Image (spheres, rainbow, N blue to C red):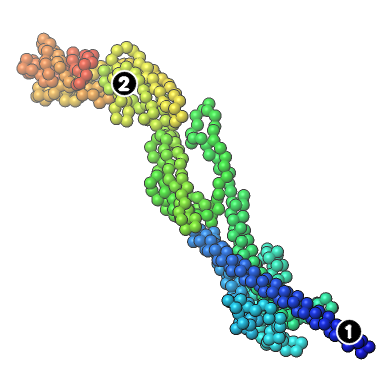
Amino acid sequence: MASGKLSPRQKMINLMYLVLIAMLALNMSKEVLTAFGIMNDKFVENNQTSAQKNDEFLSKIAQKAKDEPQQYSVINSKAKNISKVSKDFYAYLETVKEQVEAPYVEDKVDGVLPYESMDKGDHVDEKWFKGDKMSDEGEKVVAAFDKYRNDMNGLLGEGNKALKDILMSKFNTEPIKAKDGATKLWLDYNFKGFPSIASLAKLSAMQSDVKSLESEVLSRLLSGKQEEALSFSNYRAIVIPEKTAFFSGENFKGRVVLGRVDDSTKPNSVELNGEQVDKKNFKDGGVVLDFPAGAVGERDLKGKFVFLENGKPVEVAIESSYAVVPKPNSATISADKMNVVYRGIPNPMTISFAGISSDKVNASAPGLRKSGKGYLMTPSKGREVSINVTGTLPDGSKVSDKKKFRIKDIPRPAAAVSGQAGAIKKSKNSLKSATVSAVLEDFVFDLKLKVNSFKFKVPGQPTIICNGRKLNARAQSALARAKRGDAVQIFGLKASVVGSPIKLKDASPCIIELSN
């Protein structure tokens, strides 16, 4: 265009075209530089948001570790290390960015860099490179990238191939083969000869990659633990019956649910029936119970689990019940012919229904009444009595049964002298002052008998009737005339049961052989 064959006018026109093209190129360059600046601002803004979110995420993990230390303490420690490595490298990249910005800081307007003037990167090249090789400062930059990559790779551990691939692709500092086929150093390929604003935007993008990787690692740490906690291997099938005892003929009713048995999930406290459960009983994500079952009947279990969630207590109610039945430590043995009650006296009775508490059992029969924890049966008329028993089951339904007992009279008592019955020996003096009584030998009840009267007979003399328990004057006079070896008799003794109107049969006689 500027050949010597052209006229001066044509040369001028060509020169104007050159100036115009240069001006267009200059304007295009400024727009590109501005675009890099805007891009850098976006990265900086997003990085601030990402840093805030990562700090919140880290805080949540720390709270989880505080609430459930056994389950999350290891994760919390690893998360802290990852966060520290990320923040340290992020801060280092910030110092590198300050080196890139240094020549333009004084030209800021309202805190904004002069993007259109940042078309040179000579100061960066001079600082990081020495000819075709890296300077000591450049070596430090690459070493910082290598340290971050190696530290993160170690913290990721086994089983995180996807994250490791991201780490290697974003922060690999191995030499790179350029499009022209030449192999360049990583720092040379990414920064040498670039405008300052482009290098600045690239460093901000790298900071964004750091924050993004940190977020992904923290997220996978927590989700991985939650996935492990939610794994079906940590659950057991638990059968929950509608009630804790069933009777023959009933349908079993209940449901099967899944329950957590993860030992790392422990409550902060457990309250049951108003008492705090000792923490040594916390096991497999639950509580081992060991306490007296209580009296026979239905018993309630009420209380609460208390867990910490985000530092605040969360209560899980405990509502259940169980039945206490009599301990089978004795056999039921009965003699069918011995189902007997005695007329006119209180016969103690124990009446119960297996598996039903005493307060849900009612019994009825003529002469039957409650007494303390049992019953007393005092029959009067007839030869038989039936006792009817009704029990109320936990579901409100009724069961009933009955049993017959024979009514027998109190057996004939025996006359006794000084507590001795039958044929005995006594001196006249001891017999004279002795007390006559009535005894029920081998009887099941210890009844108190009162002697009303008896007959006294000395051989060869008339029979004498005595009232009360002593020989009267006539009987003593007849006794005085008796001889040694005589057999005197006490017979026809009439006695009664103290406190009962029942009449007893005349007592069997007592024969006394006089010893002197």
Q: Is residue 21 left or right of residue 161?
A: right
Q: Nearer the viewer, mark 1 or mark 2?
A: 1
Which residue reaches farthest front?
9
Q: Residue at x 12, y 13 (%)?
A: 465
Q: Secondary structure at mark 2?
A: strand
Q: Is residue 18 visible?
A: no
Which residue reaches farthest right?
5
Q: Residue at x 9, y 22 (%)?
A: 432
Q: How many marks are shown on the rendered structure?
A: 2
Identify the image quadrant of residue 93. bottom right
Which residue corresponds to mark 2?
368
Q: Nearer the viewer, residue 324 or 460?
A: 324
Alpha-carbon neighbours of circle 1 within 10 Å: few (<14), some, or many (≥20)? Answer: some
Q: Quadrant of the N terminus?
A: bottom right
Alpha-carbon neighbours of circle 2 within 10 Å: few (<14), some, or many (≥20)? Answer: some
- Against 3, residue 251 (above or below) is above
Q: Secondary structure at mark 1?
A: helix
Residue 464: x, y in percent? 11, 12
Q: Residue at x 37, y 30 (%)?
A: 358
Callout 2, which amino acid?
A: Leu
Which residue corresponds to mark 1?
10
Q: Is residue 193 left or right of residue 489?
A: right
Is disc 1 in contact with disc 2, using a CB cutoff of under 8 Å?
no
Q: Quadrant of the C terminus?
A: top left
Q: Is residue 375 left or right of residue 207?
A: left
Residue 334: x, y in percent? 41, 25
Identify the image quadrant of residue 302. top left
Residue 116: x, y in percent? 69, 78
- Against 216, residue 317 (above or below) is above
